[in-house]
Image (spheres, grey):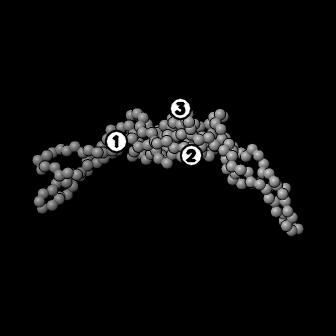
């Protein structure tokens, strides 16, 4: 802090965070050195303000068919700037012009799931997550692309063949299922006999 003239009896402290409790001490100094600090003042909370820090690490995906799962890293309490804190989620299918808006009124929230039967599997969505409190709506994050949930594979592997290897072993082989934008990645196969 800047040094204040010895005849001054008050000072304005600036650049404090909104809705945070502070206590203050005063230290006297002269050409010999710095004295002992005063006893701390009573705790004083600054006034609330609209939040200015948007959530980070916006991502998501997964879920089941007809779901859009959106996740984010929650905003720490010291950056919420007031009571009534929550999250605003806006999203739209990639290429669309109109946004859908949802509100999550929970400080601890880090996930939102939108369910709609019209959502095609693995469809890309533009997503932004913002914040609000009792003072108003704050900043939105930049756009992230999040894909809707996958569907189960709709076709069976082709070219299945079996070769006897020993009296107790049979080697089974098949043609892999190609990646399909509508059903997604094949994570594994199940062999039945």
In the displayed structure, does residue 172 sit left or right of residue 65?
A: right
Label 2: few (<14), some or many (≥20) within 10 Å?
many
Q: Position of residue 10 (x, y in %)?
A: 18, 44
Q: Residue at x 42, y 39 (%)?
A: 139
Kindly identify which residue carries mark 1.
18
In the displayed structure, does residue 28 sit left or right of residue 55?
A: left
Q: Position of residue 81 (x, y in %)?
A: 38, 41
In the displayed structure, does residue 82 sit left or right of residue 94?
A: left
Disc number placed over residue 97 in the picture, else none: 3
Q: Position of residue 39 (x, y in %)?
A: 23, 52
Are the two marked residues, 3 and 1, in contact with CB atoms closer than 8 angstroms? no
- In this rendered view, identify the residue nearer to me: 40 or 122: 122
Sooner in the amino-acid sequence: mark 1 or mark 2: 1
- In this rendered view, identify the residue nearer to me: 76 or 40: 76
Kindly identify which residue carries mark 2.
60
Sooner in the amino-acid sequence: mark 3 or mark 2: 2
């Amino acid at each position: 802090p800047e040094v204040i003239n010895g005849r001054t009896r008050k000072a304005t402290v600036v650049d404090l965070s909104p809705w945070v409790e502070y206590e203050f001490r005063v230290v006297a100094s002269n050409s010999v050195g710095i004295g002992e600090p005063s006893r701390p003042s009573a705790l004083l909370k600054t006034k609330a303000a609209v939040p200015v820090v948007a959530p980070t690490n916006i991502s998501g995906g997964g879920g089941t068919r007809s779901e859009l799962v959106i996740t984010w890293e929650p905003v720490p309490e010291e950056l919420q700037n007031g009571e009534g804190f929550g999250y605003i989620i806006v999203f739209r299918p990639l290429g669309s012009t109109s946004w859908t808006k949802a509100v999550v009124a929970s400080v601890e929230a880090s996930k939102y799931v939108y369910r709609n039967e019209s959502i095609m599997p693995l469809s890309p969505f533009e997503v932004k997550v913002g914040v609000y409190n009792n003072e108003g709506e704050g900043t939105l994050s930049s756009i992230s692309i999040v894909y809707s949930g996958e569907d189960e594979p709709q076709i069976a592997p082709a070219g299945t063949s079996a070769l006897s290897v020993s009296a107790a072993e049979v080697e089974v082989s098949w043609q892999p299922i190609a990646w399909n934008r509508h059903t997604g990645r094949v994570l594994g196969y199940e062999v039945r006999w």
